[in-house]
Amino acid sequence: MINLFLADLVVLIHLLFVCFVVLGAVFALKWPRIVWLHLPAAAWGALIEFANWPCPLTPLENWLRRRAGGAGYETGFIEHYLVPLLYPPGLTRGLQIGLGIGVLMVNVVVYTWVRRRVFRS
């Protein structure tokens, strides 16, 4: 029972991390010091997508699910949880690269806005 709870907790942490990677620059509008946390997180998120590496949280979640008597899954976190919600089935390499580019573009736009705001004040 505890392993299943921990697996679900890993999913929640993973989802929050993905959201922080994509939208963390928005927090810099309110808390500029968060940039030092967000930039490495965004770089890691983009690198994971570009290099087609598994995030370390995915094997941890699968291990906990197996220990709880359940089945893990063979795909990554994004393919298993997010793609079925946002995209048609089947994560292609092109889509994966597109996700990485999307992360970079969102952050470049927001950080450009943050930079302009900081230099105005």
Image (cartoon, rainbow, N blue to C red):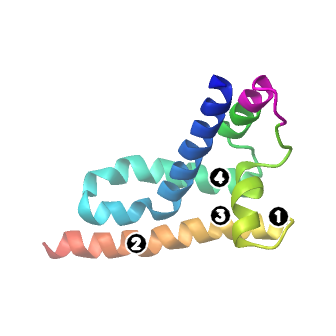
Q: To which residue does mark 4 refer?
A: 47
Quarter of the C terminus within the rendering: bottom left
Q: To which residue does mark 1 refer?
A: 91
Q: Residues within 10 Å of mark 1 (few under 14, many from 20)?
A: some
Confirm or deny contact between disc 4 and disc 3 (CB under 8 A).
no
Under mark 3, the amino acid is Gly
Confirm or deny contact between disc 2 and disc 1 (CB under 8 A).
no
Q: Earlier in the sequence, mark 2 or mark 1?
A: 1
Compared to 86, does 34 lie above or below? above
As drawn, which residue projects farthest toward the left?
A: 121
Instruction: State the SS at label 1.
Output: loop
Instruction: State the SS at label 3.
Output: helix
Residue depicted at x 27% and y 76%? 116
Q: Which residues are magenta?
A: 63-71
Confirm or deny contact between disc 3 and disc 1 (CB under 8 A).
no
Mark 1 vs mark 4: give the one in front: 1
Quarter of the N terminus within the rendering: top right
Residue depicted at x 62% and y 39%? 8
Q: Residue 26 in the image: x percent, y percent?
A: 37, 66
Mark 3 vs mark 1: give the one in front: 1
Q: To which residue does mark 2 refer?
A: 110
Confirm or deny contact between disc 2 and disc 4 (CB under 8 A).
no
Residue 100's label in the rendered image is 3
Residue 24's label in the rendered image is none
